[in-house]
Image (cartoon, rainbow, N blue to C red):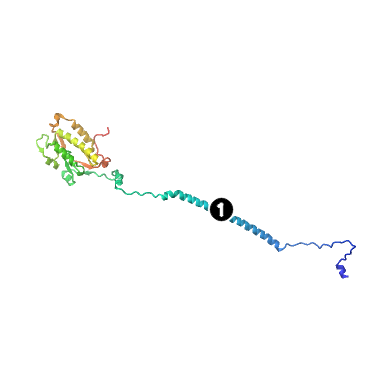
Amino acid sequence: MGGQHHYRSVSTSDEAAPLAPEKEGYLRPSGWGKQSILLSIATGTLFVAVIAAVLSTVGSAVVSYNGASSSAVTVTASAPAVAAPTPTAVPNDDDSKSADVDADILTPAVIQDCGYSPQEARDRGCVFDVMMQLWTPKDCFDSVLSERFLEVGNWTWYADPGAEHVFTLEEMRKGEHDAVYVAQDYHITHCIYAWERLVRAMRTQAPLITELISYDHVIHCRHKTLQRADGGSSIRGVRAPTGYTQCAGYDTWKFNLPSNEHSSTD
């Protein structure tokens, strides 16, 4: 009987009746559900990280390529300056001379002089130029031209205005007199001598004495050459004092011209 209470007997004539459903209760999620959620989150995070890493790698590659390209362009652009070394000038004496043409502007002028007495002039190696009546530095003395004019003229030099005493050529060469008196024709020849000396010096680039670049001396010669009374031979009143001149190259003189009373521009 106990078995009959536990089981319901089902007869063929009775309507089939479903068994009574069991009481529904709360179903707790199993442990695998939580793991699935965590796995999904981890998988998503890993995927994002992988994508980020890939993008970072690509970006770095692009930046590196651009940097390398810029460097290559810079190197290529500057390559000619590096590849073409600046030529080094080889020192040349001629170049140095041409570069120093105007050196006298910045450095003290090299002008030779003969002092103020015959003895001082001789001590400095100066020579007395009879045709110029000047103690002259040896570098400026044109001995060839001077001897030519002395031989041709056969001149006479007087010690006094009255022409009572005559100096010999040997006495004149000593240059120890204070002054001499000469005929007008000699004075004219002296001016022509100075003119020729100037041209010879300029053509040979020889140094010049002060009188050859003096405008006052030109005016003096112009006046004397126009005084031709009696053909010039009877005039013995032209006084020629002994002088002491200076000597320098034209490149020096052009920046240190001697002062003149007469203007060369008026």
Write the residue at 49% across / 50% down.
70
Asked if residue 34 lies left or right of residue 200, the reply is right
Q: In which quarter of the image is the C terminus?
A: top left
Percent position of residue 215, x then y: 23, 35
Q: Quadrant of the N terminus?
A: bottom right
- Percent x, y of residue 174: 14, 42
User: Residue 161: where, in percent of width, then height?
Assistant: 12, 34
Determine if residue 63 is in view.
Answer: yes
- Of 225 and 81, the residue lying toward us: 81
Quarter of the figure with residue 246: top left
Q: Residue at x 22, y 44 (%)?
A: 112
Q: Position of residue 222 (x, y in %)?
A: 20, 32
Q: How many labels does the image show?
A: 1
Q: Is residue 49 left or right of residue 203?
A: right
Can you name the residue that lies furthest to the right here?
13
Q: Is residue 176 visible?
A: no
Three-letter code for the amino acid on which mark 1 is drawn = Gly
- Residue 150 falls in image quadrant: top left
Quarter of the image for residue 133 reads: top left
Q: Is residue 181 left or right of residue 20?
A: left
Look at mark 1 in the image and give the residue it sits on.
59
Crowd tier of the residue under label 1, counting other residues whose Cα lies within 10 Å: few below 14, some 14–19, many 20 or above: few
Q: Which of 91 and 264 is in front in this view?
A: 91
Disc 1 element: helix
Q: Name the outermost residue toward the left.
A: 164
Q: Which residue is drawn at 86% across and 69% down?
A: 3
